[in-house]
Each structure stands twice: as structure tokens, then as C-alpha cells.
Amino acid sequence: MKLKRLKLTMPVLYIFVAAIILLALPYITGVNSYWLRIFVIIGINTVMALTLRLILLTGLMNLAHPTFMAIGAYFSIFAMTRFQLPFLVGLIGGGLVAGICALILSYPFLRVKGVYFFLITLTFLEMFRIAISNYWRDWFNGADGIYGLMAPTIGGFQFTSLAPFYYLCLVVLLITFAICWRIEKSWSGSVLLSIRDADMLSRCVGINIMSWKAYVFVIGCSLAGVAGGILAFLVGGVNPNNFGFPYAVDIQVFVIVGGMGTIWGPILGALLFGGLGDFLRGLGGYALLVNGSVLVLIILFLPAGLIDFPSRIRQLIRRPAVDAREK
Amino acid sequence: MDAAFYLQMTITAVVLSLLYILMASGFNLVFGIIGIVNFAHGTFYMLGATFVYWFMKSYGWSYFFAGIASVALAYGIGWLCERYLMRGVRGDILGSIIITLGLLMIFQSAAQIIWGEWDKAVPSPVTGVINIGGAFLPWETVLPMVGALVVMMLLYWFLMYTKLGLSLRAVTNNREAAALMGININFSYSLGFAIGCTLAAAAGVLIAPLWSISSTMGSTPLWKTFIVVILGGMGSLPGAVVAGILLGVVDSFVTTLFSSAAAHIFGFGIIITILVFRPRGLMGQI
């Protein structure tokens, strides 16, 4: 009896401790510190990684994820500087606009699957970046980007330090996590997995695979748009090159290196690699070399991602002579 | 807007078409045999050009000798990459994509560290112009055209008239059946990957005297390769030829008449249009 009660309370205890740490983090690191900034960027990266994995549940690897982030970021900037809308309206509007763009683009994009989808989103990403850095200069200001944004306000509350950004990012992250968790753990998660594993069979049992794919694609892309809005105001501006191929690769790395088997994999990946860019910049030309080597080694030795590390260690201890890769 | 202007555009179109065909056929060969998307393909193009620069500058070799050595070196590197890295993630599409992305980062930063960030140039081994009815065609653009045609003919001969080529085609067609017929699958995979990398490096070697060489020169051809491959159909060599010519012509004319950004956007527009009507590309199997 006593044991049972203890078992019930353990997860509650973990969640309680995690909540306290998450809520108190700005005051542990200091409200304007370099570390808090990195944590906000990690939060934004986690939102991107989680939504990317949501789309990946149907077997679609969306490389154009940063593009939808860019759409949200630019819309929230235009909403504030050109249409004089409140910050929150711009942020949510950015998500909606990104979602609408995703809905329109889902018709040509979702006609293909697998590697084709991968490549077409890749060309879309590059096309979008080149288009906004060369055309409509009076809106997008070319490759120089838009900088010098004012600190946003929500209902008269001014964002003077990094702490409000942190809490805003935390709210968006929790909403994203809740959406991804609900979709994956309910029956719709099984539908998505059935589309990934046997799309023709799912179609035969009456699942409308196009609308299901469009559903997760639109949800994922609109949340990416909201993340873009936060990033734009955190940095104080955006540049088309922020949303290029390197960032798209980074998000894939969070998901695949973290491990895409569970929802915790992308979170772990974003936590470990999300803030890495700032540290690696100190290495100069060697940063890319180190990054690439780490990637290759992790994929070769931990094919199911870093989240698999404890069970691999356990396996090695239990049966040291058997290599798990040699089946 | 006179005849010379249009001739110049046509020459650029031919050079670009041949470059895209070389790159895309290497990419399609790798995709057809191993079934992976090789992101390091543009890096092998860069390595081919950089090795030529290195051999010519440091050892004083002639262009032809340096070119052959560079292609051989790229073949070796491709073989080692397949043998020791790609083999560990065989059958895992996302894992192999991450591996090739890692290779892209490693090779690109290594080239930047070893040979520097600045733009390098290689002197053309041939000079002078040919006079065709009043318009002038420089020899240095004829050289890559002839070279690309020779490489394509060699590839065609290899795939169609040799036993090794036959085994590669068999593996592309049906892996299990090929293995049952006694074809060494591991060897075929390594060979296919190495030949794909060699084709990219050959494109780099041929382009080296024309364009400037730097560690990031591989990215634009990589995008163009993706467009060609989607347009022509994944894994289809005839598709690569048709789509390569199409994109080369479009690129050359749109770049000259508008800008290179417009060429990118135009290429994407073509892809979307093709995908709406033929989701598997022009020559892909439906």
C-alpha cells in the first residue's frame, strides 16, 4: 500500500521539481545573462525540433521548416512596424500566416513522399531565401535583413530584460509539447504511424492520407512561425541567411541525433546541440570540422540517437562480447 | 542584343548543361545503387577542382596530369567513405543523410583550413579562340565541353558494355536477385558510390579553369543537381540528361536576361509545375 502510493507520487515529484527549475531559471542565471539568452534560443530550437518530429511521424522530413519560421518572423515584424498591431497579435498572426502558407503549399508538396519531399522542401528553402534577399527590398531590406526592432510589450508590460522572453518561450514550448504529446499518444498518433509505415494500406482502410499529412504539416509549420516571431524580437531583427540551409540542417540534427523514437529525443538533442553554435564559434574555422565529426560518430555508434545511450550502455554491460549492430 | 550576345548565352547554356548532367548522373548513380541522397556530392565537385589547383600549384604538374590525379584521389576518398562510414548506416535513409551532411561539413572546413578561404584560379591549358562565322568561341570553354562528353561516353560504355557495369545495373534493378546471382553487393555499393563521387570531381576538374575555386563553390551546383534530379526523376540517367539540358538552357538565358536569383526562382517554378502533373519527374517510373 505504502509502496503503491510512493510509485504514484514519484512522477508528480519529478514534474514538480522540473517546473520549479524551469520557472526559477531566470533568477538562477540572472535575468540578463548570456546563459539565459542561450536557454531562450534552446527553447526556440526545441519548439522547432518538436514540430519537425511531429511532421516526421508521417515519414515526411521537412527541410523547409526554417522557411515557415521566417514567414512567421517577418509577419510579426511587419505587424508591429507597418500595421501598428500589438506584439501578441503579430506573434499569433505570424503563426497563422505560416500555417496558411503551409496549407497552400501542401497541395504540390504532399503529392510526393520520402526523398522527393526532402528534396523539394530543400529547393523551396533555398528559393525562398534567395527571393527575399534579392526582391521586394523595400519590405525585406534584401540580404542585410531588418534590425533595430523595439522591445515588444504585452498589455502595457514592457520586455525590458530577457526574463519575459524566457517565460513567453516557455509558454509556447509547453503548448507545443502538449500538442505533440496529445497527437502522438492518442489514436491519431497511430494513424500517423500507419501512414508512415504503409501508406497504401492506410488508404485502403479509409484513412485520407493527404488530409492527415496536411493536418500535421500545417500545425507544425504554424508553431514554427510562432517560434520565428519570438526569435525575431529576441535578437532584435532578422536576416534571410538566418533561415538558410545551415539552420535547416541544425534542426534535423537535433531530431536525428537526439533520437526520433520518442518525444524526448528532440528535446535532448536541442538541449545539447541548440546552444552549441555559440560555443563553437570560438573555434573559428575548426567549428564545422568538429561539428561534422561529432555528427558522423554519433550516427555511426548510436543509430537510435543520444536518447538511446543509457540502454546501449546497459546492453554493453550485460553482454560485453556481443556487438548490438551485428544482428 | 546581337548575334554574339546570343552565342555567348548558348555557349554558357551548353557548359552549364554538361556540368549539370555530369553532377546529376553521378548523384543518380549513387541514388539508384545505394538509395541515399548524397549531400556531399557538391563537396566532391569542390574537392576535384581544389585538388587540381593543389597539384598544379604545389607540384607544378600539367593540367591534364593534375586532373587525372585529382579524379583518382576523389575515387579513393569516395571508396573509403562508403567502406568505413556509409556501410554503418546502410538501409537507414535519415542516418545516411546525416552522415553525408557530416562529410559535407568535414570536407568543406578541411578544405578551408588547408587551402584557405580566398578564391583561387587555375590557368587554362589551352588559349586562343575559334572563329565560327564571325562569332568567337574561346578554346577554354571548348575544353570542358569535350571533356564532359568524353566522360559521359566513358560512363555509358562502362555501364552498358562491361561486366562490372552490368553488375551495377543489376544491383540497381533488384538488390536481392543480384546478390543471389553471385554479385558482390558490398563491392557494388563501394564502386557505385566511388564512381558517383568521381563524376562530381570530374565536373569540378573540367570547370576549374573557367570559374574561381573556393571551399564553398560546391553549394550552388548541389542545389542545381537537386533541381535536375527532381525534374528528371530520381535514379534515372536519361532523366538526368534531359533535365540537365533543360535546366542548363533555362539557367543560362534567365541569368543573362534577368539575374541569378531569378534563375533559382524559375528553376523552382519548373519543379512545382512538373510535380503537379508528373510527381515522379519527367523520366521517373510511375
Image: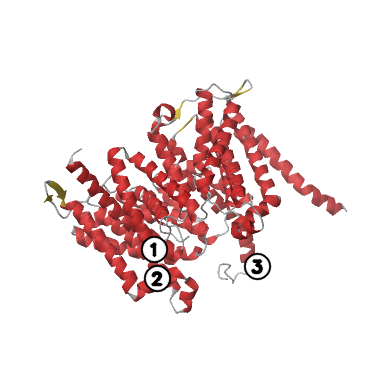
**Chain letter belonging to callout 1:** B
- Amino acid type, residue under disc 1 in the picture: Leu
Residue B19: x and y, percent?
30, 54
Alpha-carbon span between mark 3 and mark 1: 43 Å
- Amino acid type, residue under disc 2 in the picture: Leu
**Chain letter belonging to callout 3:** A
Mark 2 in CB contact with mark 1 (< 8 angstroms): yes
Q: Secondary structure at mark 2?
A: helix
Alpha-carbon span between mark 2 and mark 1: 9 Å
Residue B145: x and y, percent?
23, 56
- Please give the name of the residue rendered at 26% of the width and 59% of the height, measured from the top-left corner: B148
Q: Nearer the viewer, mark 3 or mark 2?
A: 2
Same chain check for tags 3 and 1? no
Residues packed near mark 1 inside 10 Å, few (<14), some (14 to 19) or many (20 plus): many
Q: Nearer the viewer, mark 3 or mark 1?
A: 1
Q: Which mark is residue B168?
A: 2
Residue at image mark 3: A318
Q: Earlier in the sequence, mark 2 or mark 1?
A: 1
Q: Secondary structure at mark 1?
A: helix
